Amino acid sequence: MLVELSYMIDEDVPKWPTNPEERYDYNQAFRFGDGCNASSVYHHLHTGTHVDAPFHFDAAGKTIDQIPVDDFYYTAPFVLELKKAGGERIELKELQAHENEIARCDILFIYTGYSDLREGSPEAFVSDFPSVAPDAARYLRKHFPGLKAVALDSISFDSAVTGAMEGFPSHHALLETNEEQRERTLLLYEDVNIKKLMELEDKVRVVCAFPIRFAGLEAGPVNMVAIV
């Protein structure tokens, strides 16, 4: 069985407060009297379920087209439930309490439950969502060499309220590399429907999250699928 973990994209998709609006342009349409439907889409790469490559916050990091396709295929997923209210952070001690489980996984899903607001209260969902504390982000980067990716059910690893003022420290901690670490890519998935994984309990064995690859860019929309 296949279970989609990505959200549908439409013109009203919840987004980071400063992201531009999604737009569909109908270049040809039956309703206009044309002989086919043909459309163009204006889409921000960090809206909706997407993956950040290192180049998002590392000028020397890999772009989305430079990531090996194997890095988007996961055989040891682990879902960590850490219920959070708006503005709260995922703390270092909470991750340390699950060190053994994280050490065995190749993709870590962090479920805060805040995504319950996504459909009914989208303004609240994007205004002050849970984020990852910078020291917790550094811990994930430093201590788990087998970890290929981290996924959240909120729209960003950094707060919409303080992230820009602080310089997006959690993104930097997770995506930036030095010369010794350059080959070790860590990918970040945001706005993922992790609640579906919670409902599947421990039945998921494989997760695929292949992005559309835009040459030279820092991110890509993904259709993430769990294989049960």
Image (spheres, rainbow, N blue to C red):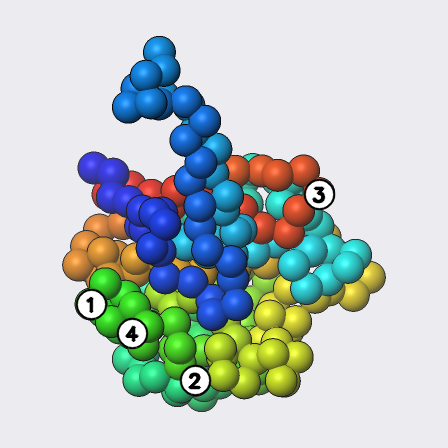
Q: Nearer the viewer, residue 159 or 205?
A: 159
Whole-number angstrom distance, CA of label 4 to CA of label 1: 11 Å
Disc 1 target residue: 120
Point out the tag, 4 or 2, that comes first from the N-terminus: 2
Point out the tag, 4 or 1, that comes first from the N-terminus: 4
Point out the tag, 3 or 4, that comes first from the N-terminus: 4
Disc 4 target residue: 114
Secondary structure of residue under mark 4: helix
**Closer to the camera: disc 3 or disc 1?**
1
Which disc, if any, is residue 66? Answer: none
Disc 3 target residue: 216
Residue name at image x 58 percent, y 38 percent: 213
Q: Amino acid at mark 3?
A: Gly
Point out the tag, 1 or 2, that comes first from the N-terminus: 2
Residue name at image x 25 percent, y 44 percent: 3
* Label 2 neighbour load within 10 Å: few <14, some 14-19, many 20+: many
